[in-house]
Image (tube, rainbow, N blue to C red):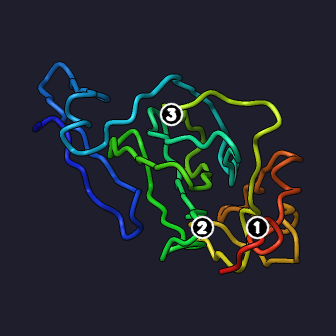
């Protein structure tokens, strides 16, 4: 190994990965993924699909998961910056309902490894951001579900975001500190909280 640094997060199953970056006057080079390095670190999942999305400042996507076909994800940002979050949904886990977040940016080149059993989402902090992620299973129509991004029982602390919880996942009344309105899809504004989504409780 040596091309990546794997940092364990406070929640088991989450890792922040820092690739080795080689730079000189011409620019830089970095391996963004190497199966052998990941396997040596104990992260030997096989990824079957790569996805990429672009979003504007104030866009929040989440909190998403697949019910019957859970995915491990490896996420990174190639332009701009986002605050990326995972919530533990594993029944019986000591950290069930807990969250962990990390800023991913084109500058820090950090990657976030999210094991199966977590909900995932992110908030765009920069004017624009391009977000890339690898997944271990394909998208299955009808299997996608989600959690309210602002569920007070989870209590995600989204940076640079202001507003007051009004009992739903609606974006109404929320904005970035500079006044940029929070933007969510209609579907993401319909998700319920943890207690209303799962029969087992916090």
Left or right of 148? Residue 122 is left
Q: Earlier in the sequence, mark 2 or mark 1?
A: 2
- Which quadrant holds the C terminus? bottom right
Q: Residue 26, percent across and down?
A: 17, 19
User: How far is disc 2 from disc 1 in space, using C-alphas?
Assistant: 9 Å
| Contact (Cβ within 8 Å) of mark 2 with mark 1 | yes
Disc marking residue 91: 2
Please, what secondary structure does the residue beneath circle 3 have?
strand
Q: Which residue is denoted by mark 3 in the rendering?
A: 133
Disc 2 is placed on an element classified as loop
Of badges 3 and 1, nearer the viewer stands: 1
Q: Count the marks: how many?
A: 3
Left or right for 2, reference 147: left
The residue sitting at 31% across, 29% down in the picture is: 32
Would you name the residue on which mark 1 appears? 198
Q: Of marks 2 and 3, which one's residue comes earlier in the chain?
A: 2
């Amino acid at each position: 190994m040596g091309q990546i640094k794997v940092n364990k997060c406070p929640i088991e199953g989450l890792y922040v990965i820092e690739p080795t970056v080689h730079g000189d006057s011409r620019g830089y080079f970095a391996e963004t993924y190497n199966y052998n390095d990941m396997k040596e670190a104990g992260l030997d999942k096989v990824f079957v699909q790569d996805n990429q999305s672009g979003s504007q400042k104030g866009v929040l996507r989440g909190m998403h998961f697949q019910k019957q076909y859970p995915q491990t994800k490896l996420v990174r940002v190639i332009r701009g910056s986002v605050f990326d979050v995972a919530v533990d949904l594993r029944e019986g886990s000591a950290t069930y309902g807990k969250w962990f977040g990390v800023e991913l940016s084109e500058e820090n080149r950090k990657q976030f490894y999210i094991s199966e059993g977590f909900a995932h989402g992110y908030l765009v902090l920069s004017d624009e951001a391009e977000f890339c992620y690898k997944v271990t299973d394909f998208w299955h129509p009808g299997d996608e579900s989600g959690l309210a991004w602002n569920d007070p029982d989870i209590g995600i602390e989204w940076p640079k975001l202001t507003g007051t919880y009004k009992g739903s996942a609606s974006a109404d009344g929320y904005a970035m500190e500079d006044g940029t309105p929070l933007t969510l899809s209609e579907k993401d504004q319909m998700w319920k909280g943890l207690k209303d989504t799962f029969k087992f409780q916090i």
